[in-house]
Each structure stands twice: as C-alpha cells, then as structure tokens.
Amino acid sequence: MNGAMAKLDQCLNMDDMRALAKRRAHKMVFDYIDGGADDEWTLKQNSRAFENYSLHYKVLAGVGQPDLTLSLPGAQANVPFILAPSAGNRLFHKAGERAVAKAAQKIGAIYCLSTLSSFSIEAIGQQIATPKWFQLYVWKDRGLVRDMIARAKAAGFSALILTADLPTHGNRERDPKNGFTIPPSMGVRQILEALKRPAWTWDYLTSEPVRFANLMDKGPAQSLAQFVHDQLDQSFTWDDAEFILSEWNGPSYVKGLVRADDGVKAIKSGFEGIFISNHGGRQLDGAPAPIGLVETMRDRLGDDITLIVDGGIRRATDMLKAKALGADAVSFARPYLYGLAAAGEAGVSRALELFYSALLRDMVLLGASSWQGIDGRFVGKKKT
Ligand SMILES: Cc1cc2nc3c(=O)[nH]c(=O)nc-3n(C[C@H](O)[C@H](O)[C@H](O)COP(=O)(O)O)c2cc1C
C-alpha cells in the first residue's frame, strides 16, 4: 500500500478527510471548497444545528440487515444519500467529476452533475449508468437553458434540479483574500503556495486547463467566469420556473429553499421535490440551518412532496436525524469533495464507504430495519 492510500485508510470520519484534503490541495482550492459567505455563520450553523436533536433508539428490535434502499421520483438507489452538485471538480483533482461519478456508481448512490462541471454532460452521461440527475442554474439566455436541458435528456439524466438560491454569487471572502479565480491565475503568492503542495501542483500543471465544460463554446476559459456571472438571472420568478419544467417534462426538484411558503409555490409550479438547502452556507449568511426546517416543511407541505436535505451532514447519525424529522433523503457536497481533493476517486470512495458502513451500524444501534421505516418516534428535540 502506498503512502497516500495508507493515509486514506487512517481517515475515520469527515474531519480526517478534510484534514487530508487540506494537506494535499492548494490553499486557494481548499478554501474554495471549505469556505462560506461573510462570517460563515450559516456554514457553522448547518452542522451545529444537528446538536439540537437526539436519537431515541429502540432495543431488541430484531433489526437484522438494515435496508438502505431509496425510491424517489427520477431514481432508485442502493443508499439514501445523494451526491449534491458541485462546480469545477477538476480544480480539486484532475479526475474531477469522472472520479466522483464512478465512486457514486460503485456504491449505488444518486449522482448530481453541476451545470458548471469541468467534464461535459455527455462525458458523464456516457460514463455512468446509475441514477444521475442534472442541475441547472437560471440563465438569462433561454436558448442556453433549452440547449442544456436537451443535452441532459439526451445523455440519460433522469431528473432535473433547478438551483434557485444563486441569483447572484454570495460573498465568499476567502476567495478574494487568496486571489482565487476560475480558472486560477498564478501570481507570486499562488506560486509560493503551489510549491508547498507538489502533488496538487503536478496534477494541475500536467492536465488540460480547467474549463466549464458545458459552456466551451461561450468563449475562452478566462472569460467564462464573467460569462457565468453575467448570465445569472436576478429577475427570475416562479413563472419562469414553469417554462423550465415544461421544457424538461420529467421528474424535477428545486434546490435552495428555506421557507415553507416557497415550498407551497414549488408544488404549485409542478416540482416533485425540494432540496431544503442554503447552498452549504455559501450564499446568504444568516440563512437558517436546513435540518431545523425539515419538520415545518413536512407539516406544511404534506407527504406527497419529496424532501431532500443538505448542509452540514458529516455523520450517518445526522442522516438518521434528517430522516426521522421528515426528510426522504439527504445530500452533501463537501464530504466527497474533501475525499476528491485528498486522493481522487479513492478518496471519494473512502468518504462514501465511511458513510455507508456508519449508516449500517447506526441503523442497527437505532433499532431501525429500513431507512424507509425511520420516523418521528426515533428523534427528540432539545428544549431551547
Ligand atoms: C465547492 C462547492 C461547489 C458547489 N457548486 C454547486 C453547484 O454548481 N450547483 C449547486 O446547485 N450547488 C453547488 N454547491 C452546493 C452543494 O450542492 C450543496 O448544496 C452544499 O454544499 C451542501 O452542504 P455541504 O457541503 O455542507 O454538504 C456547491 C458546494 C461546494 C462546497
């Protein structure tokens, strides 16, 4: 076993994985994954809020082998966790989204490809057969929206996720402090940092320049970030969302909701599901932690809508709490991105396997024989 694999084997949880990513990745890249908006209050709150809940386990429940399978509009999966969309994965490791998609397929999880991926819709579409969903931002150019939807359909993506919480970019201050841009520019400071991270730097220098692969025809790499910025539509409304749904005409989710009244509008517009999410604390600092919203959303929206929760999930027990509070499934990005930045596909697989084996163990400890069967009787709330 080589040194990198041995270090990976020693990772027992997502904090360990994060530490390994920090050691391998360039500082500006690690901070892009790790950071949040403004004071990062929401980012911290996302994880801390899980502490408001406890798990009330049953004993002698005859659990046997727990059933982790998941059935949602647009996918059947072996595990109840979903790999959330994340942009530009080749910045973190040259194998990028290909590595993440392969690891997701290996464990049987739903994989979400970002609009701003660094491998194309077609490349990932051909690579994996397991459930794959496509995430869309709300672009001003409706032709571009139509084009992306058609490409995702043709490439076999089985659900569309419309990300609604990015009408403009959040204020992530670590990035300008590090001089970080997409694609990265290498001034003196970045070069000095690059020397401290030889494995990342070798990867970066010996592979193709990182591009937003789905926008290759929109100009040179240097101007793509500006193109994306200019294309984000601040005037977008629920009526416009209906246009997207009619173009897609299949299972659909809207991502980035924190309010039950927006949930009501999502149902009215025709979405089958909602990602209760604040973009991992990267958009509006001060936004509430998703886990604290699940119960209200479920009570207000009823049982027919699919609820997926993301933000701050770092343990299998966080997943169990989310399900017990009323979520159908959970999702995360940083845990697999730390794995990717630490060791490519092997790192992503290690992160997913840690979650998988912990879920199996923790369901036995909880006294739950199936993911589906975990309900409100298993969770308690801290009195505040
Ligand atoms: C580096 C990074 C890039 C992201 N890119 C996207 C994206 O392209 N589209 C999107 O809808 N969400 C994006 N997200 C948000 C995630 O999909 C997800 O909502 C969030 O990260 C969940 O929080 P967690 O990282 O604590 O699990 C990104 C998150 C990170 C960390």
Image (spheres, helix red, strand yellow):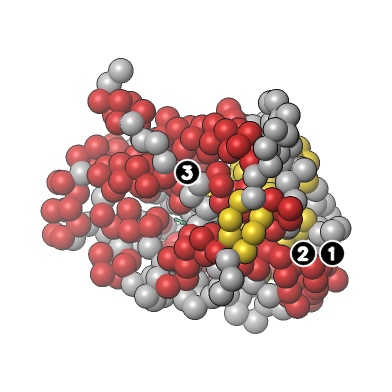
Check contact, mark 1 vs mark 2: CB within 8 A.
yes
- Circle 2 packing at 10 Å, graded few (<14), some (14-19), many (20+), is many
Q: Residue furthest bottom?
A: 235
Q: Which residue carries the number 2 mark?
A: 298
- Circle 3 packing at 10 Å, graded few (<14), some (14-19), many (20+), is many
Secondary structure under tag 1 reads loop
Q: Residue at image x 72%, y 61%?
A: 274
Number of the label disc, if any, that sits on residue 302: 1
Compare residues 156 and 343 and report the one nearer the observer.
343
Q: Residue at image x 59%, y 71%?
A: 383
Q: Is residue 4 above or below residue 363?
A: above
**Cα–Cα gap, marks 1 and 3:** 31 Å
* Disc 3 within 8 angstroms of ligand 1 (CB): no
Between discs 3 and 2, the one toward the N terminus: 2
Question: Label 1 amino acid?
Answer: Gly
Residue 143 visible, this orientation: no
**The N terminus is located in which quarter?**
top left
Q: Quadrant of residue 370?
A: top right
Where residue 302 sits: x, y (%)?
84, 64
Compare residues 263 and 160 and report the one nearer the observer.
263
* Disc 1 within 8 angstroms of ligand 1 (CB): no
Q: Quadrant of residue 279?
A: bottom right
Q: Residue at image x 49%, y 78%?
A: 286
Question: Label 2 amino acid?
Answer: Arg
Q: How many marks?
A: 3
Where residue 352 sits: x, y (%)?
52, 36
Question: Label 3 amino acid?
Answer: Tyr
Number of the label disc, if any, that sits on residue 336: 3
Where residue 205 sits: x, y (%)?
26, 41
**The C terminus is located in which quarter?**
bottom right
